[in-house]
Image (spheres, rainbow, N blue to C red):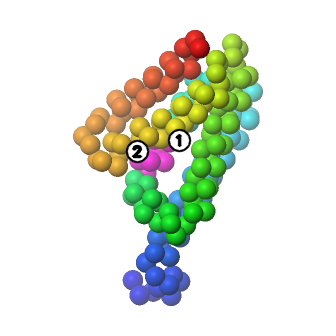
Amino acid sequence: MGTLYEYFPNKRALLIALAELHVERAAETIGALQLRWREHSQRRPEAVVDDVVDLLIANHARYRGMHELLPAIASDAPHLASRAAGMKDELIHMLVTVFEQSDPPIAEPKVRASTIVTLCAELVHGPWLRETATDTDQWCRHIHALFRGYIREPA
């Protein structure tokens, strides 16, 4: 442990570096998803929503501890909160673009995209951060079904 402090002046600096790495990995995952979407001109909105849900679920499940750490270090690393908000905005923008280009177009694309990203992030924080006994696969199927149905509801 003493070796780590050659690179980091204290525990807080080490935690911030870990959080920065986590946020960078999340940004890379979003970038890869954007690239994949650009390569497929015929993007079904349901498939894109599934991709966003899968990304958020995987990110929260894989790095559960980071989501407890981020609020704890927010005052020392406001750039991380800003970057996370920017990634959320990117996901919303990507969904809006797909929704507007779909045939037929999705009603209220901005509202629906924002609702999906925000609500999904809130939903995935709950069970994984509280470590409930929820059947994860079943829970994920329900989230997918919920948002697939939501985007096809009339305004």
- Three-letter amino acid code at the position of disc 2: His
Residue 97 belongs to the span the image colors magenta? no
The structure residue drawn at horizontal position 43% and vertical position 29%, both measured from the top left corner, is 143
The structure residue drawn at horizontal position 58% and vertical position 26%, both measured from the top left corner, is 112
Labelled disc at residue 55: 1
Of tags 2 and 1, the one toward the viewer is 2
Q: Position of residue 47 (x, y in %)?
A: 58, 26
**Is label 2 in a helix, a strand or a loop?**
helix
- Three-letter amino acid code at the position of disc 1: Leu
Quadrant including the C terminus: top right
Residue 32 visible in the picture: no
In the rendered structure, are the residues bearing label 2 and label 1 in contact, judged by CB atoms less than 8 Å apart?
no
Q: Position of residue 54 (x, y in %)?
A: 50, 37
Question: Which tag, 2 or 1, sits closer to the chain's start?
Answer: 1
Write down the quadrant of residue 38 in the picture: top right
Q: Label 2 to label 1, Cα distance in Å?
A: 13 Å
Residue most extreme to the left: 133
Please tell me how many numbered marks the rendered image carries: 2
Question: Which stretch did the figure color magenta?
Answer: 55-63
Most foreground residue, 4 or 149: 149
**Is label 1 in a helix, a strand or a loop?**
helix
The structure residue drawn at horizontal position 71% and vertical position 41%, both measured from the top left corner, is 35
> Is residue 153 positioned above or below 62 on the image?
above
Taking the image as shown, residue 78 lies to the left or right of residue 37, namely: left
> Is residue 47 positioned above or below 21 on the image?
above
Mark 2 lies on residue: 125
Q: Residues within 10 Å of mark 1 (few under 14, many from 20)?
A: some
Residue most extreme to the front: 75
Q: Is the stretch drawn in magenta largely helix, strand or loop?
A: helix
Q: Residues within 10 Å of mark 2 (few under 14, many from 20)?
A: some
Write down the quadrant of residue 69 in the picture: bottom left
Q: Position of residue 152 (x, y in %)?
A: 56, 15
